[in-house]
Amino acid sequence: MKVLIFDSTVLEQAPYIKYYEQELVDRNIKYNICTWDKYSNAPLSKKGVVITIHSKWHLGKRKYLDFVLLSRKLKKIIADGHYTHLVIVNTIWAMLLRGILLGNFKNRYVLDIRDYKCETLPGYQHFLKSIIDNSFFTTISSDGFRAFLPLSSKIISNHNITNLKLAFESPSLYANKIHVNIGFFGYIRYKNENEVLIRKLGGE
């Protein structure tokens, strides 16, 4: 058995990867983690178990071509590495790898959905359902994703927060503090959702 985990997110911003990695290490299963350096063009590099595809990403319409070119490189890595199982993070990559997932890896891949981009495009749901139904399982980081994902018994909810029970039992760590400053590091994409969050935190 040999597993390839692919996530286009910078590994430092993907804390959930360590949970997959720990399970594989505990079971003495061979694995690699493949990631995408979208800021430079360079030959494929490898450090330890991490394989990095260096392929510059362009904004605008060109980015979809970049996705296709990256998926071709990923397919070659999968073929050359003789992997038996895959973990694919987010649906856009699963869609681009749909042919090999449904052909060579049926019931031998995990789809991990932690973001949403194209789920409302015409026809996307139809093809996505076949990918989810033929996965070993599909995990979502939020139950809210069920509102736009196709129905499937393969979908399970699994967030990488390990102290969720404590969070519900003790919802505030600053019960006696009047002002709480919230800092955000990362990419802010979802304007409407963030506006709702700000209003709720503001006492609306």
Image (tube, rainbow, N blue to C red):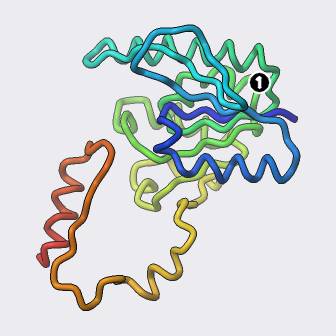
Residue nearest the viewer, comparing 193 with 119: 193
Residue nearest the viewer, comparing 190 with 176: 176
Rendered image quadrant of residue 33: top right
Q: Circle 1: is it few (<14), some (14-19), or many (20+) Cα within 10 Å?
A: few
Q: Is residue 29 above or below residue 34?
A: below
Q: Would residue 177 be found to the left or right of residue 187 on screen?
A: left
Disc 1 on helix, strand or loop? loop
Q: Residue furthest bottom?
A: 176
Q: Would residue 124 be found to the left or right of residue 7 on screen?
A: left
Counting from the top left corner in percent of width and height, residue 146 is at 46, 56
Residue nearest the viewer, comparing 61 with 101: 61
Q: Which residue is mark 1?
A: 104
Quarter of the picture holding the N terminus: top right
Could you tell me which residue is drawn at 64 percent across and 50 percent down? 18
Q: Is residue 30 above or below residue 163?
A: above
Q: Residue furthest front?
A: 47
Residue nearest the viewer, comparing 4 with 68: 4
Quarter of the picture holding the C terminus: bottom left
Could you tell me which residue is drawn at 71 percent across and 46 percent down? 21
Rendered image quadrant of residue 117: top left
Hey, what amino acid is under mark 1? Asn
Counting from the top left corner in percent of width and height, residue 114 is at 47, 47
Could you tell me which residue is drawn at 47 percent across and 14 percent down? 55
Q: Is residue 62 above or below residue 91?
A: above
Rendered image quadrant of residue 170: bottom left
